[in-house]
Amino acid sequence: MVVVGSLAAGLPLGLVWWLVAPLARLTKRDDGVFAVGAREETAVAADGLFAVLGVLVGVLAAVLVAALVRRRLAGLGGLAVGGVLGSVLAWQVGAVLGPPSAEASAAAARVGARFDGPLDLSALGVLFAWPMAATVVYFAAVAGLDARHTVDQNHARLEPADVQPPARDGLTSERWREGGSSGVEDRGFDHCG
């Protein structure tokens, strides 16, 4: 279920990445296709934007899974596998929606024409931003939820009505709760007298 949800989240992630990612500007000359401006900066910006969007989706997915999935190991596995698959799907959606390859665009363009380069990832490591963020946030959320649950359970076990004092000098637990005395004078530890 978590993997299917992650795949479903990959589609809008790819769409958003395609809409906001910068594209390299290319120009066709007699001797080939060349970048106009700094193509490397545009590629780094597109990769960074993909990573940020992946982290946001991973955090959201982790919070939802921590709140809704009771089987912790299944939730973790689903986030890891689903995050990788969702990232790959988002990358491919953005690439398909973006401009065609530089060669295909250049073949259709006249000499001197400028056109957008393809939307692609230059650093494939950013595909792991989503699953890594999801697993880290999931661990933190589950630790917080489990710690709170443990404290609540321990607190429920230590209700005052459940505490039974040892019987001492004829003082029963009922008389102890009522604040009664056993009739025996408590002389303390001062026996030097």
Image (tube, grey):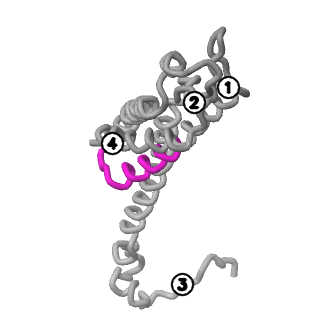
Residue 49 on image: x %, y %: 58, 39
The residue carrying mark 3 is 186
Looking at the image, is mark 4 or mark 3 earlier in the sequence?
4
Type of amino acid under label 3: Asp
- Alpha carbon distance from label 3 to label 2: 93 Å
Which one is closest to the eye, mark 2 or mark 4? 2
Percent from the top left, x then y, of residue 88?
Answer: 42, 29
- Magenta segment, which residues? 55-72
The residue lying at 37 percent from left, 55 percent from top is 67
The answer to whether mark 4 and mark 3 are in CB contact below 8 A is no
Residue drawn 48% across the image and 37% down it: 130
Q: Name the residue tied to disc 2.
A: 116
Q: Earlier in the sequence, mark 3 or mark 2?
A: 2
The residue carrying mark 1 is: 39
At label 2, the amino acid type is Asp
Would you say the magenta stretch is mainly helix, strand or loop?
helix
Residue nearest the observer in this picture, 74 or 24: 24
* Label 4 sits on residue: 8
Q: Nearer the viewer, mark 4 or mark 3?
A: 4
Label 1 sits on what residue type? Arg
Residue 182: quadrant of the picture:
bottom left
Q: Which of marks 1 and 4 is nearer the N terminus?
A: 4
Say which quadrant the C terminus sits in: bottom right
| The magenta stretch spans residue 173 | no
Q: Where is residue 93 in the image (x, y as percent from the top left)?
A: 40, 33
In primary-sequence order, the first of circles 2 and 1 is 1
Name the quadrant of the N terminus.
top left
Q: Is disc 2 in contact with disc 1, using a CB cutoff of under 8 Å? A: no
